[in-house]
Image (cartoon, rainbow, N blue to C red):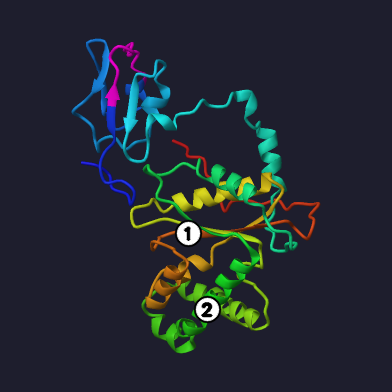
């Protein structure tokens, strides 16, 4: 048995070099599938695995003697690398400064984003944690202002053909069948959104992706953990900020291109390979505005459980 993704249907293959193994048991400690055990002073595969090796690589990464190799599920010993030292990592104060400096930027200069920076953003985003490896996050990249504009134009034409879903008669028809919050969402957010998006494009104003010189769409598949593309998008956003780019997360496009024949046609044109429960666009570019002050935010509630 193995957990399926679009990239892997079989379990990973565990190979153990008994000559190198010292029987320390670290691999057993970190394997949460219970696929490993220590027998006669050596690590060995067990018959009590829950799913079979999912290819997380924890055992291979922690083995002090390099006795374990995992192959399959898009991982192999060639993927191992030495972790940076603690001294090379970002300290909390620096991380907090980066997070506090970031604001959602929707005003960009005409300067394009170099492909070297795009690669750096993707290299950072791919380190994001995931529900089950190998990652089922897909990324569609629009790497010029012209491509961003073309996608927006096609998206707004699609919205024009779908205006009936925010029409008065449709919302009235649906009111008994969905929640009050859904009704409020469609009347007070989705319907005005259709209007500003489509009327903006009629005036040659891109209010969808804001004429950014770079946009990335992170989405999953029918197998993906719904959180995976959102976490990867967050990593990409922070990477862009660290590289001196302005960034903005945009969530309104994704749900509108998930259902129906016309949405499928749009996805196919832009090689969006799967429908996805969750997804996010992130736009990047050099800011044409400069913020000197931030705004303190708060959670809806933070509750500490008391037993």
Drawn side of residue 261 relative to residue 303, left or right: left
Badge 2 vs badge 1, beta-carbon distance below 8 Å = no
Locate the N terminus and report the quarter of the image it occupies: top left
Q: Secondary structure at mark 2?
A: helix
- Residue 16 x %, y %: 29, 21
- First reached walking from the N terminus: tag 2 or tag 1: 2
Tell me what residue is drawn at x 45 percent, y 29 percent. 80
Q: Which residue is mark 1?
A: 279
Tell me what residue is drawn at x 50 percent, y 76 percent. 186
- The mark closer to the camera, 2 or 1, is 1
Drawn side of residue 289 relative to residue 176, left or right: right
CA separation, marks 2 and 1?
22 Å
Q: Is residue 25 magenta?
A: yes
Tell me what residue is drawn at x 47 percent, y 59 percent. 279
- Residue 252 x %, y %: 54, 67
Q: Which residue is mark 2?
A: 187
**Span of residues in magenta:** 15-26
Q: Nearer the viewer, residue 247 or 75?
A: 75
Circle 2 packing at 10 Å, graded few (<14), some (14-19), many (20+), is some
Q: Is 175 placed above or below 60 here?
A: below
- Residue 289 x %, y %: 79, 59
Disc on res. 253: none
Quarter of the image holding residue 286?
A: bottom right
Tell me what residue is drawn at x 34 percent, y 18 percent. 67
- Residue 283 x %, y %: 62, 59
Locate the C terminus and report the quarter of the image it occupies: top left
């Amino acid at each position: 048995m193995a957990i399926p993704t679009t990239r892997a249907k079989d379990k990973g293959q565990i190979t153990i070099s008994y000559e190198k193994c010292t029987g320390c048991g670290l691999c057993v400690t970190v394997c949460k599938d219970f696929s490993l055990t220590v027998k006669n002073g050596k690590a060995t595969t067990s018959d009590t695995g829950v799913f079979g090796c999912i290819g997380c690589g924890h055992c291979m990464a922690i083995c002090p003697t390099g006795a374990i190799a995992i192959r399959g599920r898009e991982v192999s010993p060639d993927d191992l690398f030495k972790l940076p030292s603690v001294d090379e990592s970002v300290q909390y104060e620096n991380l907090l400064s980066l997070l506090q400096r970031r604001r959602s930027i929707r005003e960009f200069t005409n300067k394009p984003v170099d492909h070297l920076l795009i690669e750096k953003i993707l290299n950072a985003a791919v380190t994001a944690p995931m529900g089950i490896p190998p990652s089922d996050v897909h990324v569609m990249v629009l790497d010029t202002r012209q491509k961003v504009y073309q996608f927006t134009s096609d998206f707004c034409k699609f919205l024009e053909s779908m205006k009936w879903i925010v029409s008065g008669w449709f919302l009235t028809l649906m009111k008994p069948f969905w929640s009050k919050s859904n009704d409020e969402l469609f009347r007070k957010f989705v319907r005005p959104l259709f209007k500003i998006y489509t009327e903006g494009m009629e005036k040659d104003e891109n209010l969808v992706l804001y004429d950014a010189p770079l946009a990335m769409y992170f989405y999953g598949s029918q197998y993906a953990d719904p959180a995976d593309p959102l976490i990867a998008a967050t990593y990409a956003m922070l990477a862009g900020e660290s590289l001196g780019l302005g960034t903005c997360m945009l969530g309104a496009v994704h749900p509108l291109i998930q259902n129906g024949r016309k949405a499928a046609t749009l996805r196919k044109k832009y090689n969006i390979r799967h429908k996805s429960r969750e997804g996010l666009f992130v736009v990047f570019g050099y800011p044409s505005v400069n913020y000197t002050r931030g705004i303190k935010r708060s959670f809806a509630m933070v509750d500490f459980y008391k037993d």
